[in-house]
Amino acid sequence: MPAQTQQTAPKQPRALKHAVELIRRPSVTPEDGGCQDYIESVLSPLGFKRTRVDCGEVYNSIYTRLGEENGILAYAGHTDVVPTGPEAQWPHPPFAATVEGNVLYGRGAQDMKAGIACWMAALETCLAKANSHLPDLQLLITSDEEGASVDGTIRLVEYMQEHGKLPDAAIVGEPSSAEHVGDTVRRGRRGVVHVYLNIHGKQGHSAYPQDAENAIHHAVEAAHAIMHIDWGMPTPGFPPTSCQFTQMNSGEGASNVIPGQAAAFADIRYNPALNFEQICQRIKSACPMSDIVNLDIRHEAAAFHTPDGPLLDLVCDSIRRITGIETRRDTGGGTSDGRFLASAGIPVVELGLTNDTIHQIGERVATAELDELTRIYTDIITHFEGPTCL
Ligand SMILES: [Zn+2]
């Protein structure tokens, strides 16, 4: 059956309809492709007001609906997607949003247009109920999550801080689930520190080392010292701090020349038991700066950790009610925009679809997942009781 016929079938669930609409608006980062306009077209009849907080070429929108109960519940997500890779290798064109069998194909199917679609459908369900008493609801949507992440969610958080509108809690819709929707939520992420080492020795003949200063030898010693730093006890529930050298470059292209210059780069993923200042201190005491060794240490992303408490309980209870699953409260993976919300003091939990094909050629999601996630989101919105429960 042609995809078009299925997608316009009258019984198509709302989440699937929204997911198809969003995927059909190509939006490789930092493009938005009209996705945020589409979200507005769905939410504005429900009483949401859109505020644009665009920054440079990045599209940022806050959709707000004032509620009848206390508290502000936010949902954060992104409309940008990663590039498709070779389109000819896709089983269906990446922006066609083809439904074949019970599977939706397309860039953003898991990460994370279909997740946003589920939250939109959940809002429609909640607001269709008579006598529904809901908190203030916010959607914080950016087109800069897959790129540099410098003009996206962080700008939305700054705007809300300036206007006194920070939410009491935030659900980030990144695809957190492993095998079944809701089997895993993320309640924190490690932070990222980058270390650039530049070594300035003295070039010379390898048969006359007394007249040279070997930059490679200094680079290896410095890397060795940094690699073996004791980072201490990790925060329970988090992977330990890890330091990986991912680049080391030197050499003059000749076998008999001692190089005078070398460069190395380390990517540190740090556990929230540490902070940036402590990391800098330990690196500098393990590898002191000198005329030869120059260190440039940069804080790329802050770690965050939402402690056990009412928000995590609310999310896990909703998952259990809908699916029967006992959720794993995980802290794995790379960084996410959750860090910007958490650094403003907002409790953050990431809950979304499965993630086994994110960023891959042929990204796809089972349509049943959309139904399940929509029901979980609906349950969370319905049971959110405002700041008193947090
Ligand atoms: Zn994502």
Image (cartoon, rainbow, N blue to C red):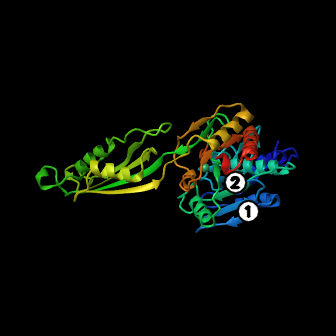
Q: Please tell me whether mark 2 sits on a helix, a strand or a loop.
A: loop
Q: Quadrant of residue 90?
A: top right
Q: Position of residue 160 (x, y in %)?
A: 62, 63
Q: Please tell me whether mark 1 sits on a helix, a strand or a loop.
A: helix
Q: Quadrant of residue 26?
A: bottom right
Q: Position of residue 227 (x, y in %)?
A: 33, 43
Q: Is residue 132 left or right of residue 197?
A: right
Up/down of 305 relative to 205, above or below: above
- Identify the residue under disc 1: 37
Q: Residue at x 69, y 41 (%)?
A: 365
Q: Quadrant of residue 70?
A: bottom right
Query: Which of pointers 2 and 1 indicates the residue nearer the eye?
Result: 2
Task: Say if residue 272 shows up in the picture.
Answer: yes
Quadrant showing the N terminus: top right
Instruction: Give the amino acid at mark 2.
Output: Gly
- Mark 2 and ligand 1: say if the CB distance to the nearest ligand atom is below 8 Å: no
Q: Is residue 208 left or right of residue 157?
A: left
Residue 71: numbered disc: 2
Instruction: Give the amino acid at mark 1.
Output: Asp
Residue 248: numbered disc: none
